[in-house]
Each structure stands twice: as C-alpha cells, then as structure tokens.
Image (cartoon, grey):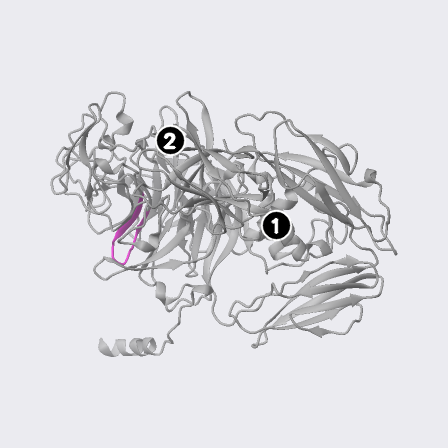
C-alpha cells in the first residue's frame, strides 16, 4: 500500500505553492437583467439554471454566452412567496428532471415541491404537464424559506421558514387571533414542517422515502421528514458530502433586549439532528424570557437544557430536545465574536464549502487558500466571507472575498465544474428595474494584459485644432509599469507618454490610436476620433441653477450659446426641453463614477467620437438609441454589455469597439443616461433659449423626483464637416420629495409601510453604513432639511448628510429617535452647512453611539430655506 502511495506523495510534494493575491479574484458578469432571481444550480456541463421569484426558469449557456427562458412556473406571488427553490435531479444529465419549490393559492395557500422534466430537442422547454407533486405544506404569512439542496446520496434538504409575522416582542403570542405571531405553533411543533430543515430521499417516480437518521423515527412523536427544528427563516442549505455536515443560514429577529436577548442572524452547522432553539432561544443559545402577551409581564428565561412547548397552538410533543447554539451569530451592532461581519441591517445567506481540487485543469478555479472554507454572504450588507472550518468543525479565521466590489444583494452562490463560483444577486429592484445579476467569481493567474483608456480635453475644434489627450485611465491589473504610444491617421508624428498634446491642421476626421504595453509584451489598444474644422457649440444655462423647485411654480429660464463658426445665434434656434422624472430609475446615475455622473464619464471616454445627442454620426445618435429601446426593461443590461464587449449588426456594419476599461456598474450608468433621454418631440419650452416654464402641480403620494432641463444647440456644420451638437443639463429637485426616489443607494431597503389610518407610505430603510445618493444638488440658500422618520422600540440611530461621497464632508447630523412603531412617524430637523457648488448629496446611516440597533425608516425629505 505504501509503495502505491509513494508516487502520489511525490507528485504532491513538487506542486508549487500558489500565493494568494486578493486582487486577482474578479467578478465576471454573465447576465445583468435578472428580476428577483433567488436560486441557481450549475449542471455538470456548465449550464447555469436559475429561477426568478415571479415564475421564470432561465438557463445561461457558457458555450453561446446567451440566456434562454425555459418556461414560467404557475406560481402565485404573495408576501415573500413565489418561486423559491430549484434543484437538479442527481441524474439530471440523462433524465433532465429538476425540482421546483413554489407557492400556490388554491384551494388554500401552500408551498409545493414538485418534479418537472425539460422537453424539446435542446431541452429548452419546461414541460408543465410533466409535474409530479412531491410534497406540500401550508403557508399564510411571511418567512417562507425555500432554499433546497440535493446531496451526493440523493437526499433532498429543504429549508422551510416558520411562517410567522416578525415583531419586536417574542414570537410566542398565544392570544386568540394572534396565531400568526406564535412560532411555537410551527418551528417548535414536532408535527409541523414549518420552521424546519427537512430531509427526504428522492425516488425517480416523483415520490420520496425517509432516510435513516432524521430527528423523529416515531410518527407519533414528530414528522419523520424533520432533521432540524427550531428554525426561524432558514434560507440557504448546503451539505458537505466529505464530512456529512449540514450547513444553513438563518435570518433572525429584531426582538427588544428586555425580553431576554436581542436578535441575531445565524450560520448553523451540525452533523446530527436536533432542536436549534427558535422561538425560545437564538444565536449562542441566548434565552428569551417567558412573556405574558396579554398582561405585558416579562418572566423568567427559558431553560436550554430542557425546553418545553406548552402553546395552545402546538400539535406536537411538549418536551423538546435540548437547544443547540448557532455556529456563527451576529446582530445589528458590531459583533464581539465575529467583528469582520460588520453592523447594520442583516440577512444571512450561504454558499458552498469549497474543496480545492489540485488535479482540475482550470485557469479560473479558486486557489488552495479557499480549501475547506465555507462561503457565507449577507443580503443586506452586500458582502461575501470565507470561513475556515476547523478539523473539529469549529469556526476558524474568516476572510473577506471581493472586498471593495459593489454587490447587489447576494442571494445564492454555487461552485461550478470549472472550480469557479457562480453568484446570483437579487438586485435593488427599485421601481421595477431589472438590475439583478448572474456572475462568475474567477481567479486570474499569470500576467494579465493592461487596459487602455483615452480621455480628451476636446474632441472637435476649428483648424488648427489643439487638444490634450490622456491615457491616465489606463491601468495594469498586476501593477506593472506601462509604456504609452500614440499614432495618428493624419500622418502626425507618433508620440510617447501618458499625457500628450496633439494639433491637427488638416480639415477632416482623424483617428488617434493609443497602444499601452507592459514589460511582458502584453498590450491593449484604444482609439478616439478627433474632428478638425468645426468646433462644438458651448451651451450654458444661466438660470435656473441646479437646485429645487416648488410644485406648480413658474420658473424663468435663460440659456446662452456661443459657436466659433456660426457667429451670432438666434435664441429661437436653441432647444430647451423639460422632463419630470418621478422614479430613481429614470435618472442616469451610478455609484462610483464621479459626481458628474454618467454623462461626465461618457465625455471622458470615446463615446462622443462616434455618437452625438441628436444627429447620426459613425454610429446612431443617443436619442435614436433611447427611442429604439424605450419601454424595454432589459435594454439597460443589454446596452451595458454591448459597451463593454463591442459588436455590430444593430445599426449597420460599423463595428463598435469594446470598452474593457469600464466596470459593469459604469456601463450600466452610461446606458441608463442614454435611455433616460426624453423623446425628440418632448416638451419643448416656449421662447427657445429664454422664457419660463411651469413645474408640475401638486404630487400624489408617490410623486417626487426632479425636473431635468436639457438645453441644446446644433450648429450648421463648417468646412465640409458635419454638424456638432452642444448640450447641457440642469437638475431641479422637488423641494419636498420621497426618500425612496433616490438616484442610487447602498444596503437600503425600499418598502411600503401601512399606517394606522390604512394608508401606505413608500419609504427607505437605513442602517449603519447604508446610504442614499441624490445627484447634482446645489444647497445654496438651504438652512435645514426636514426628515419624516420612524423607528420601532429598540431601534433608531443617527442620520447624516454628507457632500460628494458617503464619507465626504459632514454637512448635517441628527439623532433619529424611537417613535414607538414603524408606522408612527416624527419630523426631525437637520441644520445644513452649504458645501458650495453642485455636489451629490448622500443621506447616510451614521455610526450609532448608543445601545439601540441602528435601523430607521425615512419617508419624506423637505429642503427648507428657513429654520422652522
């Protein structure tokens, strides 16, 4: 035996150690138009199957890099329900069978696990007639869970939520009519599948058997499907086939401390069945206290070693197994035990336990440093962490993954046959925008090519035309020193350097080509078109300035235009259009691209060398693109990908160059700017460049947003060169607006809150470190901002106003008080210091110095010129 092992040991001994460089771990977007995607599975051939909550089942192919919708699951979406779970059969490669978990409302509301088969020559059709119902369970309110996993033995594990309303009091309310507030009727009920991790063995005919080793072998004691009970809202479940350990993530409560303990989210691990505490214990087996909901009397803490379920709503055993603590737990505040998990809103998610395979030939597989690490995520905090699982199963060190990458609600993570990870992001889903995403997490080895990027001081001008060109946006992923060489199609001498000056004397369009090279000989090329003979008109809005408008007010407008070739310009030839935008998705924007937003990013790129606002050039005009895709919800992701990868065939035969120097977030912001352009025949203001216009009247409950004034002038062309269009925009924000109508956000929930008077408010919920961004605000004359806020008992926090960035200059701060309930609102006043000029305004959940959990809602913001 030892002789047989010697060659293997020798081979292992000579394997070179691979140093892990975090910057080489990259997020590669694959699909960018997902709407409420919740779970994915990776097939053995590399195909990615994923579901969206409202019903679509979709497949992404690595061979064609295209996405196909295979069908729509007949689900009824209510509360958190919809299509919640997806698993591929163990023999999926031959049977094409898969399992779906989805909600039904007839004859009663319930969750259903069914087997389906894919049909068609390419197995590209979900055959609804093939459905075989495996298992149903009732559902009536929140907390569905829904995560599902099939292990190497063919056992299916299903994480089922407790189907109980959340509240700041313990979930043990047994008063008549309050059954939905009692998790003792579900999670701690041995005869109910809700609030459990169940394990069943799948049979090919769509039935199931009970594998040995579950919690209850006697049906009189409990349902035989149950493996783990005492769960609140378990959302992701995974089994490590090597160790047999079960892992699951659990979204926890926000209970007030006076009831014994606050709330925690959990990551759990176990190799044996048991009771995991809820609703009597949470986190590290922290005990809640007995509480008489009718008399409002708090009693003694529950006993973890001998818990009992005496609820009148319990149909199972009263004597429960000893409660077990979570493997990892964290609350809304900084965790003493696991400080790397941060603070703020929380929603724990789970990925795989990574097993490194040294024999796998893959250029993108994760390095050995991740071997034996469990990947965990947080949907609210937008992070991914890798937890070392010690040999005895305890928690080892925790390392960040993709630190600095802006995530969009990570919700599922799976390993692929290439050793890479596949990430599903739910997206912010604000105002119906399809901004969820499927991506691949890869590790880039070896020398990586540089990325060339050009920015120009000006792209056109009268002869002789002089402009400065910069390669400052170019970068080398490995940090290598770069060389820069510039060539010009007009025969000008080649130049070298990161910044150069070029002068063109010959009338016409000329191409400037930048080649960026690293010491290993890898290079990348970028081009920009420069036009000599006709300068771009200079358009300036004298008034109004970037600022605020009042509903129904009359606003004077004055625009000046100068053009070197056209001379005197009649105001009648200046076009000024207004557009009232009342949703954040209507405004071009994007985090991380600078305070002048997508338009500024496009000016610094080479976009304007091939496109103008209104006139077709080398490519279509921006307005033509906006018109073609108007109303198409998938257009933003489509155009963003086109900008990154390039292509041809949509508008003619001219090839659009790729732009790898930009991130996906940047190109999506650029696409959003284009798609938000108003129609050419939109509201043209009277009087050309001078006159007045009237702001919209009194808004309804969801209105707000801003008015975008677009002033433009197209010249007559000169010296045989095509016409040039100069354009500029001014953004006027509603003086009183909804906080939920932001331009961009981070770790913010947008929700409707019912009030005591049965009306509903659309509000934004912030926690520590989360923020809203409102683009291009001029706070001149603003003395204070009035904010309508709510915070339940035990919550509250700090609200900050910052200029230019989430950590920019502090211009206002206020402590958000506890208002009593989420539907009880109070106005707080924030004195403001004007930073001067036009900046993005950030509304930030500041660091809370007190003991309350940092969480509060903002309904309206009002920018006041006088303190009241």
Q: Quadrant of the N terminus?
A: bottom left
Q: Choose between 540 and 475: the one closer to the eye.
A: 540
The residue carrying mark 2 is: 822
Q: Earlier in the sequence, mark 2 or mark 1?
A: 1
Q: Which residues are magenta?
A: 237-250
Q: Residues within 10 Å of mark 1 (few under 14, many from 20)?
A: some
Q: Quick check: 729 left or right of 590?
A: right
Quadrant of residue 743 within the rendered picture:
top right
Query: Horizontal and vertical percent for residue 170?
Result: 24, 33
Q: Quick check: 5 left or right of 522?
A: left
Judged from the image, the secondary structure of the residue bearing numbered disc 2 is loop
Query: What separation in Å lies between label 2 and label 1 (alpha carbons)?
Result: 36 Å
Residue 639 visible in the snapshot: no
Task: Write the residue at 69% across / 49% down.
Answer: 650
Tell me, yes or no, whether the two marked residues, 2 and 1, touch with CB atoms within 8 Å.
Answer: no
Task: Write the residue at 70% across / 67% down.
Answer: 513
The residue carrying mark 1 is: 596
Quadrant of residue 354 within the rendered picture:
bottom left
Q: Does residue 244 belong to the magenta stretch?
A: yes
């Amino acid at each position: 035996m030892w002789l047989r092992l010697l060659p293997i040991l020798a081979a292992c001994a000579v394997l070179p150690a691979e140093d892990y460089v975090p910057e080489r771990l990259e997020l590669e977007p694959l699909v960018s138009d997902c709407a409420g995607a919740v779970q994915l599975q990776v097939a053995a051939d590399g195909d990615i199957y994923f579901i969206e909550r409202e019903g679509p089942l979709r497949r992404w192919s690595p061979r064609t890099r295209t996405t196909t919708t295979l069908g729509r699951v007949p689900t009824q979406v209510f509360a958190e329900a919809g299509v919640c779970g997806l698993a591929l059969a163990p023999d999926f490669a031959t049977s094409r069978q898969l399992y779906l978990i989805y909600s039904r409302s007839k004859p009663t509301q319930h969750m259903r696990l069914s087997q389906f088969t894919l049909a068609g020559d390419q197995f590209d059709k979900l055959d609804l007639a093939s459905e075989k119902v495996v298992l149903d369970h009732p559902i009536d309110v929140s907390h569905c869970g829904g995560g599902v996993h099939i292990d190497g033995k063919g056992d299916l594990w299903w994480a089922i939520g407790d189907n109980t309303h959340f509240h700041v009091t313990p979930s043990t309310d047994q008063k008549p009519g309050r059954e939905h507030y009692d998790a003792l009727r579900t999670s701690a009920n041995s005869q109910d599948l809700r609030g459990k991790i169940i394990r069943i063995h799948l049979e090919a005919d769509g039935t199931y058997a009970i594998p040995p080793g579950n919690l209850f072998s006697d049906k009189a004691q409990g349902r035989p499907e149950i493996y783990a009970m005492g769960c609140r809202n378990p959302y992701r479940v995974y089994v490590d086939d090597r160790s047999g350990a079960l892992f699951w993530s659990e979204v926890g409560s926000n209970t007030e401390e006076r009831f014994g303990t606050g709330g925690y989210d959990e990551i759990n691990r176990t190799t044996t069945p048991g009771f995991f505490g809820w609703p009597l214990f949470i986190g590290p087996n922290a005990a809640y206290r007995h509480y008489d909901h009718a008399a409002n009397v708090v009693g003694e803490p529950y006993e973890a070693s001998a818990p009992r379920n005496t609820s009148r709503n319990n149909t199972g055993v009263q004597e429960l197994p000893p409660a077990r603590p979570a493997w990892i737990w964290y609350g809304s505040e900084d965790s003493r035990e696991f400080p790397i998990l941060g603070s703020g809103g929380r929603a724990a998610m789970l990925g795989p336990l990574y097993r490194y395979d040294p024999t796998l030939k893959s250029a993108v597989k994760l390095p050995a440093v991740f071997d034996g690490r469990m990947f965990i995520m947080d949907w609210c905090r937008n992070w991914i962490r890798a937890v070392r699982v010690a040999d005895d199963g305890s928690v080892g060190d925790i390392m960040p993954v993709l630190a600095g990458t802006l995530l969009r609600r990570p919700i599922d993570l799976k390993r692929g046959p290439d050793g890479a990870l596949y990430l599903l992001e739910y997206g912010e889903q604000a105002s119906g925008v399809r901004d969820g995403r499927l991506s691949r997490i890869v590790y880039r080895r070896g020398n990586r090519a540089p990325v060339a990027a050009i920015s120009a001081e000006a792209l056109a001008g009268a002869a002789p035309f002089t402009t400065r060109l910069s390669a400052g946006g170019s970068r080398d992923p490995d940090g290598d020193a770069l060389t820069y060489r510039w060539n010009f199609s007009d025969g000008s001498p080649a130049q070298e350097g990161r910044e150069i000056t070029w002068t063109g004397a010959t009338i016409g369009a000329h191409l400037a080509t930048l080649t960026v090279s690293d010491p290993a000989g890898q290079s990348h090329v970028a081009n920009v078109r420069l036009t000599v003979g006709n300068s771009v008109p200079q358009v300036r809005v004298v008034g109004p300035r970037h600022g605020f408008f009042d509903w129904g007010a009359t606003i004077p407008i004055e625009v000046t235009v100068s053009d070197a070739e056209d001379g005197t310009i009649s105001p009648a030839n200046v076009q000024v259009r207004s557009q009232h935008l009342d949703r954040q998705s209507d405004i071009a924007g994007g985090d991380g691209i600078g305070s002048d937003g997508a338009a500024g990013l496009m000016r610094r790129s080479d976009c304007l060398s091939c496109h103008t606002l209104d006139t077709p050039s080398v490519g279509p005009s921006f307005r033509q693109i906006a018109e073609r895709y108007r109303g198409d919800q998938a257009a933003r992701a489509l155009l963003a990908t086109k900008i990154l990868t390039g292509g041809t065939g949509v508008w003619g035969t001219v090839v659009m160059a790729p732009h790898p120097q930009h991130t996906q977030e940047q190109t999506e912001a650029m696409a959003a700017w284009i798609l938000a352009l108003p129609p050419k025949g939109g509201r043209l203001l009277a009087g050309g460049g001078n006159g007045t216009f009237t702001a919209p009247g009194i808004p309804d409950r969801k209105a707000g947003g801003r008015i975008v004034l677009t002033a433009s002038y197209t010249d007559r062309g000169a010296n045989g060169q095509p016409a040039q269009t100069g354009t500029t925009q001014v953004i006027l924000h509603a003086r009183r607006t909804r906080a939920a109508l932001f331009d961009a956000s981070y770790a913010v929930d947008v929700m409707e809150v019912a009030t005591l008077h049965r009306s509903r408010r659309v509000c934004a919920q912030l926690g520590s470190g989360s923020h809203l961004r409102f683009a291009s605000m001029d706070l001149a004359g603003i003395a204070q901002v009035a904010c309508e806020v709510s915070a339940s008992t035990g919550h509250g926090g700090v609200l900050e106003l910052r200029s230019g960035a989430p950590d920019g200059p502090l211009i206002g701060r206020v402590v958000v008080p506890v208002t009593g309930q989420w539907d009880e609102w109070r106005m707080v006043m924030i004195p403001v210091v004007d930073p001067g000029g036009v900046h993005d305004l950030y509304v930030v959940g500041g660091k809370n110095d007190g003991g309350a959990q940092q969480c509060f809602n903002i309904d309206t913001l009002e920018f006041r010129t006088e303190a009241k």
